[in-house]
Image: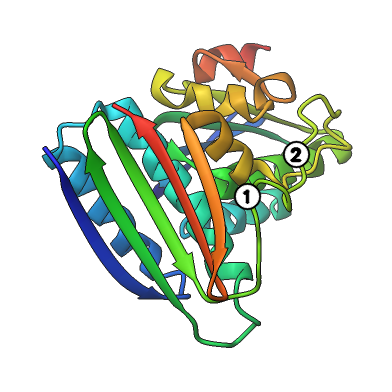
Amino acid sequence: MIDSYRINIKNELDELATVSQKLEELTEKWEVDMGIAMNLSLCLEEALTNVIFYAYPKGESGDILVTFQLESGSVSVGIEDEGIAFNPLTDSKEPDLEASIEDRQIGGLGIHFIKQFMDELDYQRINNKNQIVFSKKI
Amino acid sequence: MELSIEKRGDFTVVSITGRLDTTTAPQLNNELEKVEGDGARSVVIDCENMDYISSSGLRVLLVHLKKLKGAGGKLLLSNIKDSIKEIFVVSGFTSIFSIYDSVDDAMAS
C-alpha cells in the first residue's frame, strides 16, 4: 500500500498535538508496529519542536509543512520550513552521553534520537527552505 | 498527562500518567518545584503509567535530579515501561539515574 498525508501548520506549540494525533491515526491505519509508531512519534516531536522553537525569529509567524508517507516497507516523515538554515546532520552537537550528572547537558538529544531510532535522515536546503526527511523501515 | 503526588514517609512519590512531552513537561516542572519548595528532598518519579517521554520530559527530570542532589537529596525513577526504556538507554540516562522496578524498591534503596 502507498499512502500519504500533508498538513500545513504554523510555528506554534499547540500544533504539535494535532500533528502527533494525525501520525497516530495514520500509523494505526497503516498497521505499523506499536514500538516503531512510538519512535516515529518521538522523532516527529523532536524535529518539529526544533523547528517551532528555532526556525523563525522569536515572535514571527512562520509556515511549516509536515508530510507523512507510507511506501513499500517504510514510513517517512517530512518537515519543511522557510526559516533560518539548519542542517541537523552537521549543525547539531552530539550529546556527551558519558558526562557526569553535574556536566550532563540536555542539548542535542532530539537529533540524537532521530539518528538512533530512524533508518534514514536527510536534509536539503532548497529555495530558502529547510527540508528534513526521516524514515523507518516497517 | 496527569500527575498525582503522595507523601510516603520521608519520600514524595510523583506518579505520571500519560505522555510526558513538550506540551506537558512544564506541568511536571511546576509540580516538582512546588514539592521541593515544600521541603521535599527525596522524590520518586513513578513511571508505571507513563506511556511516552521525549527530550523535553527528560530535561525536566535532569534539571530536578541536579537540583535535588545539589541540596543533598535524591530523585529516583521507578517502573519504567519496557516500551520507553530504550529512550532512557539511548539518551544515556540509565547511567545517571537510579532506576528501580517498584516504588518500594526505590524507597528501600
What amino acid does circle 1 point to? Leu
Is A127 on the left or on the right of A73, as rendered?
Answer: right
Residue that appears at 52% across and 46% down:
A122
Residue tagged by mark 2? A94
Vertical order, B108 against B28 (above or below): above
Residue flagged by tag 2: what amino acid is it?
A: Glu
Viewer-side residue, B26 vs A37: A37
Residue B77 visible, this orientation: yes
Q: Nearer the viewer, residue B17 or A127?
A: A127
* Residue A10, position as x, y percentages in the image: 41, 78
Residue shown at 61% from the left, 19% from the top: B99
Q: Who is closer to the viewer here, B22 or A52?
A: A52
Helix, strand, or loop for circle 1?
helix
Query: Mark 2: which secondary structure?
Result: loop
Label 2 marks a residue whose chain is A
Residue holding disc 1: B32
Question: At x 15% / y 32%, what residue is drawn?
Answer: A31
Gap between marks 1 and 2, in whole Å?
Answer: 28 Å
Measured as percent of width and height from the top left, residue B12 is found at 60, 36
Against A119, residue A71 (above or below) is below
User: Is B107 rendered above or below residue B23?
Assistant: above
Q: Which mark is residue B42?
A: none
Residue A19 appears in which quarter of the rendering? bottom left
Rate crowding at label 2 as few (under 14), some (14 to 19) or many (20 or more) other CA atoms within 10 Å. Answer: some
Q: Residue furthest bottom?
A: A60
Quadrant in the rendering for residue A78: bottom left
Labels 1, 2: front one: 2
